[in-house]
Image: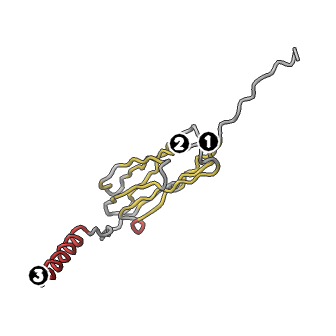
Amino acid sequence: MKKLYILFGIIVIIMIIGFATYKQEKSYSVNAKVEIPIMEYDFGEITYLDTINYAFKIKNVGKEPLIINKVIPNCTCTLLSYESGIILPNNETEIFAQFIPNKTRLGENSVSILVEGNFNGGVTHLKMKGIVNNIPKVKTATNTMYN
């Protein structure tokens, strides 16, 4: 019987720890209105040695403060930076994206950037796309005079 009480006590402690550490998804009581002029940036054709830098602009056009919680790329080929915090009405912020292609992903490339905040239902997606080419081979001149 004593073992049963100990087992019950351990289960209760585990449940308390589980409830205490459970993290709910963020929900917002206030929804900001935003304007994102370019949600999809096409960088055209590049080689795998090039690096693309682009700043996505997000303007708060509503009456409520804008909060951006997370900005996450869908691949390790993209580095992001942004100012976290509150963007007041009629102010704007930028999300800086840097796409670094590699030789193993030649051809059409598309990177999605998830932005979580109190606008557009909580989540919106930005996109960078283009074509990554190999380096063109340089033809060497041959001397045909002596052949």
Relative to 35, 28 lies left or right: left
Q: Quadrant of the C terminus?
A: top right
Where is mark 1, residue-wise? 46
Residue at 32 percent across and 52 percent down: it is 84
Closer to the observer: label 3 or label 2? 3
Where is mark 3, residue-wise? 2
Q: Is residue 2 positioned above or below 19 on the image?
A: below
Q: CA distance from mark 2 to mark 1?
A: 9 Å
Residue at 56 percent across and 43 percent down: it is 102
Relative to 133, 15 lies left or right: left
Task: Residue 117: give x, y in percent of width and height.
Answer: 36, 62
Colour mode?
A: secondary structure
The tag on residue 52 is 2
Task: Residue 119: give x, y in percent of width and height.
Answer: 39, 64
Task: Residue 139: give x, y in percent of width and height.
Answer: 75, 28
Task: Residue 104: give x, y in percent of width and height.
Answer: 59, 46
Sequence-wise, the earlier of marks 3 and 2 is 3
Tags 3 and 2 touching, CB below 8 Å: no
Sequence-wise, the earlier of marks 1 and 3 is 3
